[in-house]
Amino acid sequence: MSYLYKQTPLTPKRLSQLRLLISELAQLKNPNHADLLSLLRKYPDPAGGMFAKSDLNQAYKRLLSKGEIKPLPKKTLQLFKKRPIRTLSGVAPVTVLTKPFPCPGQCIFCPSDVRMPKSYLANEPGAQRAERNFFDPYLQTINRLKALYANGHKVTKAEIIVLGGTWSFYPEPYQIWFIKECFHALNDFGTEKEAIEVRKKVKFYESLDRQLREKSYHSFIKDDPKKNEKELKEKAVDGLKLKKNYNQVVQEVYLKPERVLGVSKFQSASWGELEKQQKVNETARVRCVGLVLETRPDNISEAEVVRLRRLGATKTQIGVQSLNDTVLKKNKRGHDVASTRKAFLLLRLAGFKIHAHWMANLYGSSVEADKKDYLKLFQDKDFKPDELKIYPTSLIASAELMQYFKKGLWRPYSQEELLDVLEFALTHTPAYCRLTRVIRDIPSGDIVVGNKKTNFRQIVTDHLSTKGKKLVDIRAREIRDVSFDVDKIKFSVITYPTGVSTEKFLQFTVNVGNEEKLLAFLRLSLPTQGGFIDELKDSAVIREVHVYGRLADIGEKHRDKAQHLGLGTKLIEKAKEIAKKSGYKKLAVISAVGTREYYRKRGFKDGGLYQVASLTSLKSW
Ligand code: SF4
């Protein structure tokens, strides 16, 4: 069984065919996807089928290094990229899943697939990748970087997104180890150490797998789907019967054997070990420019916020789900709106970016109630998330919601109702918020009844354009790969109050046709009340700096792309002016480990958890 991303080897026969293909492509003036497709058909893979984009990338790099071909124009090379959108926002996303583990929540809508961390399903592509890699953070990170690189993406700036259950509920030594191993993988990627480490880890997990089988604990993580299926049936959590819940099964089949076999010893690390890997990452080839952790509002406390920061986190994904206490209670969320309010307050005072999850069609809600709730998300000054995922409830067989459905207490929205709610939500999302997802991408086979379409953002956008309306959220305005006139760049500020700060969204935009496109932005927080972190006393906080454009290597210059117009530096300069005028003595930044060097070069000094610049001594550019 292969655990890591593997490419079909470039045999002489395959390479020779690819040489012909690439040479013919090089003759074409401004080739497009259709041209490439006809060449892929003309020169099929001798191993069968058509060549993959990773084959084109591999062959191109090989032929170029041997001097057998000339470099292709950048535009032509874009055709070799699989899903170019992945790195268009300027950063390579690396999503990693934690292992199956009990969750303190009892949410009735939440799937319970015991092969996965709570709420994830084994059929989701990201989840499958994680399972193939034993949920090991090192293997998952290496695997993802390899896949992105092989498909033509640059991976010098990575955002690590940790998903799965409730992060804060995992034991601290596991959390530290998990993050340490993500950094370890970024630091080792493409070096000789990588292969040695991968071999070591695979050996460990193979031996563990053998022992689990011998002792008959479980055999989920094996190359035997048939047996998996049989076993899963026995161990599955059934939303209708609920003989055992997810937490009980996970205790039985993972945690108990793990204790016996000493897995927790292997999966634990100290703060010192983590800090060592973080230090290496500051100047590594693949730097961590963002670290996202997912948790519940009631797990956020002052101490927890400090701990998340110490791990290197810059953003939290937080399940709001509803801002109505009755709905939260009916869905057994186990927390109220007050705890969400408090979590937002603490995270904002600490400068975190807040990525909220909100749900429509929950048990006890309605189309009109959902619209009211969504408005509250942005009108109530205590919330106003920076990013948002909208997840309309999907009915999954393993969720307790099945019982409510069978009794006729809940039903999924019709397509019209769903469109109504989503259109309302999308058109009431402000320009400072990024709508990262509109429907959760659940494999249609897992949805018992209800909507199976995942392209609702497109459906709503098309519907709105027939009425001459446009969305204004960040994602709708990102410049992506559109050419623009450098002389037409404009600077503006969106100001909005929150319960604990005045937020300034500084942005560089440019008009392309009749659309305003976003080139870069900076989130500046001007606290209106004292916080709980001494380091941030009298300080304004930069919560995020983001410059769009195709991901460029660190230090590489592209005059025509947004990432190298110096917009990030200009935004920091503007933030300094605004903070100074507003009476703050210092400007702090919640920097990611891999951006520490960037801020040092701009006059920020390392503090305990943040980098801080005195506003009087900050260099002027
Ligand atoms: S807290 Fe999240 S993961 Fe846990 S049961 Fe609720 S929705 Fe599922």
Image (cartoon, rainbow, N blue to C red):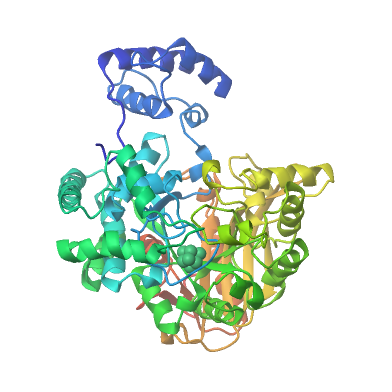
- Can residue 550 be seen here? The reply is no
Compared with 194, 312 (above or below) is below
**Towards the viewer: 337 or 71:** 337
Compared with 112, 385 (above or below) is below
Please provide percent x and percent y for residue 102: 37, 67
Report the side of 349 relative to 287 (left or right). Answer: right
Hey, which quadrant is residue 149 in on the image? top left
Hey, which quadrant is residue 165 in on the image? bottom left
- Exactly how many numbered labels are in the figure? 0
Please provide percent x and percent y for residue 614: 46, 79
Quadrant (top left, top right, bottom left, bottom right) of the N terminus: top left
**Towards the viewer: 148 or 281:** 148
Report the side of 405 relative to 464 (left or right). Answer: left
Seen as rendered, the residue at the extreme right is 467
Hey, which quadrant is residue 485 in on the image? top right
**Towards the viewer: 610 or 265:** 265
Report the side of 534 relative to 328 (left or right). Answer: left
